[in-house]
Image: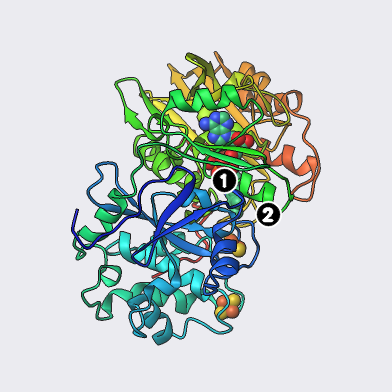
Amino acid sequence: MSDQISVPDEQSDKIRFVLDGEVIEVGNVDPTRTVLQFLREDIYRTGTKEGCAEGDCGACTVVLAELNRDGDDLSLRAINSCIQFLPTLDGKELITVESLDAGGELHPVQKAMVDCHASQCGFCTPGFVMSLFALYKTNANPTRQEIDDALAGNLCRCTGYRPIVDAAKSARDVAAGDDWLRQPFGSQTIPVERVERLQGLRREKSLQLVGQDKSFFAPTSSDELSEILAAHPDATVLAGGTDIGLWVTKQHRELSTIVYTGHVDALNALSVSATHIEIGAAVTLSNAMAVIVELYPDLDELFRRFASPPIRNAGTLGGNIANGSPIGDSMPALMVVGTSLVLRSGVDTREILLDDFYIDYQVNNLQTGEFIESIRIPLPEDNVVLRSHKLSKRFDQDISAVCTAFKLKLEDDRVKSFRMACGGMAVTVRRAFNCEAEIVGRRWNDETLGRAIDALRKDFVPISDMRASAGYRLQATQNLLRRFYLESRGEFTETVYSYGRQG
Ligand SMILES: Cc1cc2nc3c(=O)[nH]c(=O)nc-3n(C[C@H](O)[C@H](O)[C@H](O)COP(=O)(O)OP(=O)(O)OC[C@H]3O[C@@H](n4cnc5c(N)ncnc54)[C@H](O)[C@@H]3O)c2cc1C
Ligand code: FES
Ligand code: FES
């Protein structure tokens, strides 16, 4: 490590992270204090704004830099600081909008925002700048769709998105300068000092903040995680916090013991074998989805419509499954492809089909002290048609009214196998067994479709809520089955989601 880099000695009861080249140590803190609260209220760094405090508006966007898996370079991701608990910063570098200031000189993305007149009241602007900064540092030549996707978690109520998109396109034309923060992706060098500083923050002993009322543990191995959960059976397992963060900021729940999975090596592993994709339960949605989409390209749009990049950069597939919302978007598709979960308790592991995981509304098969270690997704089969459709009022960053998934295999004009699963239609995401039974073994024709559509009434008795009425949900699901039928026969060619994205 270079001589000039000084890192304080490790203390397992202090959070240590880097901010503008300085190692910040924080001890004796409420573990559910959010990064945003720390920035604005503790160190008066108020450039980062609070709009919604629930991950929806992007005003609080900051960027995290972390060592990559090899530990020799940094990887960057934008996240929502309003629902990220402070101890999860341990070992990382935090980059806020103030970090981009180079002695009063605007960063290229800021300059582009100014030049394109992309800000009016300015409240949303720091969040947009940070999302654009993350894009600038991770994508050399973003397409219009990639720009739109990168901004899907940022709301602006006055300027309109066209000038902001123009700024995203033109940021690379602004003179960058030598500083690593200002160098765009593709021409950036490895920031050796930054890497070494984070290497210096690696821990021998895991972080443990033990207070009178609240404790936070960040184990580094599955064994340690098991032991802590055995000793604290009531603990809350925290992954990305994109559900749990809202329990605190919106429901004002007090969490006495938190066990964070983000440092557990095995839970951050991701591999593809001859039979399946194995995704550690703490792998972010962004990283998990990238691998899944490579093998299942039909799921690309579903995942683009899952929350926003900052949420996908923090949230995990394990958290989506364990949270078990009836409108969780990953589960219908994962169910129809035959996904299973590896659960661990103490030294014992067991594998359970996702189909069998849910018992009732937000009640699952996990026993006390048990956790999800990994998610096993079988590799795609040949000659299968797979689709998953999310129905919501907006394309980006919206909650599903219903979400369906279908998998069909035909043999000699008969249905060899068919699976359908739905979210938003019952207290849990679940398979449509009656509908499936009407289809398997029959010819794939209009008559079979008619029977299957009727059978959906036996499978689901949906509820009415503010998102959709029961009648709408049933009708929409029946229509989506019809759509899948047409898609599978090559008779559905219209791109319904083309809504004017140009240029
Ligand atoms: C603005 C916003 C938009 C969203 N949009 C969508 C969307 O479009 N579609 C959608 O489906 N969801 C959406 N969500 C919900 C959320 O992002 C997902 O459910 C996410 O996958 C949760 O993962 P997490 O890692 O953040 O979980 P956390 O919040 O950390 O945990 C969620 C639950 O899972 C449990 N848990 C986590 N890991 C484990 C483990 N290894 N073993 C056992 N239990 C575990 C926790 O104890 C907790 O009960 C959205 C959330 C927000 C805030
Ligand atoms: S304040 Fe709205 S996303 Fe964080
Ligand atoms: S400039 Fe006012 S909210 Fe975007």
Amino acid beneath label 2: Thr
Which residue is the site of mark 1?
Answer: 241
Marks counted in the figure total 2
Left or right, residue 169 beside residue 73: right
Which residue is the site of mark 2?
Answer: 249
Q: Judge whether residue 455 can be spotted in this image.
A: yes
Q: Quadrant of the C terminus?
A: bottom left
Which residue corresponds to the image point at 65% horizontal and 19% vertical from the top-left?
433
Ligand 3 position by quadrant: bottom right
Q: Position of residue 67 (x, y in %)?
A: 31, 49
Amino acid beneath label 1: Gly
Secondary structure, mark 2, is helix
Residue 77, quarter of picture: bottom left
Binning the other alpha carbons within 10 Å of mark 1 as few (below 14), some (14 to 19) or many (20 upward) gives: many
Which is nearer the eye, 469 or 500?
A: 469
Secondary structure, mark 1, is loop
Q: Is residue 232 above or below residue 351?
A: below
Q: Position of residue 407 (x, y in %)?
A: 50, 27
Residue 195, quarter of picture: bottom left
| Upstream in sequence: badge 1 or badge 2 | 1
Which residue corresponds to the image point at 62% horizontal and 45% vertical from the top-left?
243
Q: Position of residue 88 (x, y in %)?
A: 49, 48
Q: Is residue 404 above or below residue 142?
A: above
Which is nearer the eye, 302 or 197?
A: 197
Which is nearer the eye, 32 or 243?
A: 32
Would you say the beta carbon of the disc 1 residue lies within 8 angstroms of ligand 1? yes
